[in-house]
Image (cartoon, helix red, strand yellow):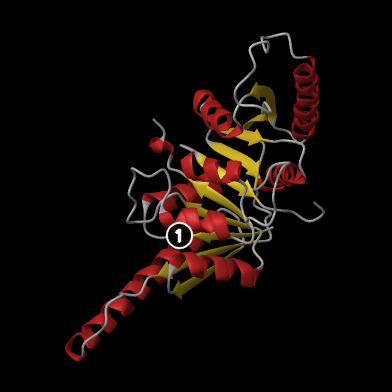
């Protein structure tokens, strides 16, 4: 079974990683760790373009560090892991990745880092659950339960 | 860890069972196999008192057989297992049942036995994914199902 773990830097993603570590068999075919860097949706004027590019590079570097950190943790636990960082709209990138890599299951947190907790799940998780070509596991942090 | 496996007699539920058995490690996990009998009409006729409806009791018997059969396979894989049969609205009973039992994870198929597959997600799975207070896995398919 090929698992896709879609993460960002949030406690919801942490819940997804915890679930993977605590409950999943180590003999899965592989775990693909995917982090999607969202581009700034601003039209760059010339004097802004340079600083925006720098900020984008920084976001990408943070994302690569996050993916590398998570990969290391999972490898230490005995999983076969491949990290990837993509840029674009998260839902589309996650679904395209799963289709391309023929993942059997997408595991992701219930919310992203922007997480509005008054909704039970965030917009990315909801869209992925609806449109994914494969199974989807939405992980909630244990404390979220009343 | 408590895993609620919500099933009916569809191939999607078989895929959900298969996913549970192939993904998870048994130690420390308790699985509750739940099936919900949905009445055909939402407004019961006045004569529909407990013990009256013979066709419903036939459904209950079939449902118990289904959960017991499924539970045996899960038990054989090394999990702690219990079973439950409930009646009412499937969405409501799965969510209420998971809250009351204190489930950490709900596992269910993407469609039910009435599943209209041209939609990517059935109405029960969609509702559970959006409203569950705990983690939820929606199983779409597996080889051979």
Q: Is residue A32 left or right of residue B114?
A: left
**Quadrant for the N terminus of chain A in the image:** bottom right
Residue B58 placement (x, y as % from top left): 81, 20
Direction front: furthest residue? B46
Query: Could one spot residue A76 in this view of the protein?
Result: no
Q: Position of residue A100 (x, y in %)?
A: 63, 72
Q: Chain of mark 1?
A: A
Is residue B132 shown above or below A71? above
Relative vertical location of residue A19 with respect to residue A128 in this rendering, above or below: above
Tally the numbered discs: 1
Residue at horizontal 58 percent and vertical 38 percent from the top: B106
Q: Nearer the viewer, residue A121 or A75?
A: A121
Give the residue displayed 70% in from the left and 46% down from the top: B115
Asked whether, in this view, residue B93 is left or right of residue A69, the answer is right
The answer to whether residue A80 shows anywhere in this view is yes
Give the quarter of the image for residue B28: top right
Q: Is residue B137 left or right of residue B21?
A: left
Image spot of residue A128 (x, y percent): 52, 58
Residue marked by disc 1: A7
Q: Between B43 and A92, which is closer to the camera in this rendering?
A: B43
Residue B8, by quadrant, is top right
Q: Quadrant of the C terminus of chain A?
A: top left
Asked which quadrant contains residue A28, the reply is: bottom right
For the view shown, which residue lies furthest in the bottom direction? A46
State the SS at label 1.
loop
Q: Nearer the viewer, residue B63 or A72?
A: B63
């Amino acid at each position: 079974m090929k698992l896709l773990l879609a993460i960002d830097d949030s406690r919801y993603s942490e819940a997804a990683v915890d679930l993977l570590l605590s409950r999943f068999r180590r003999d899965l075919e592989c775990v693909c760790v995917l982090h999607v860097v969202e581009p700034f949706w601003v039209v760059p004027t010339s004097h802004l373009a340079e600083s925006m590019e720098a900020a984008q590079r920084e976001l990408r570097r943070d994302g690569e560090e996050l993916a590398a950190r998570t990969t290391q943790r999972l490898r230490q636990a005995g999983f076969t892991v491949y990290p990837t960082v993509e840029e674009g709209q998260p839902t589309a990138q996650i679904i395209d990745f799963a289709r391309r890599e023929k993942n059997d299951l997408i595991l992701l947190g219930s919310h992203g880092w922007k997480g509005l907790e008054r909704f039970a799940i965030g917009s990315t998780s909801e869209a992925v659950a609806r449109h994914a070509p494969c199974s989807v596991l939405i992980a909630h942090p244990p404390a979220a339960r009343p | 860890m408590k895993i609620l496996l919500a099933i009916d007699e569809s191939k999607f539920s078989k895929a959900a069972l298969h996913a549970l058995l192939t993904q998870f490690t048994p130690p420390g996990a308790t699985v509750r196999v739940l099936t919900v009998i949905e009445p055909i009409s939402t407004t019961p006729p006045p004569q529909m008192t407990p013990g009256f409806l013979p066709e419903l009791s036939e459904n209950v018997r079939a449902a118990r057989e289904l959960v017991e059969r499924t539970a045996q396979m899960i038990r054989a894989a090394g999990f702690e297992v219990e079973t439950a049969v409930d009646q009412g609205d499937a969405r409501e009973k799965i969510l209420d049942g998971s809250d009351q039992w204190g489930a950490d994870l709900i596992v269910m198929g993407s469609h039910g036995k009435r599943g209209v597959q041209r939609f990517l997600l059935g109405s029960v799975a969609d509702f559970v994914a959006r409203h569950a207070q705990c983690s939820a896995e929606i199983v779409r398919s597996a080889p051979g199902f």
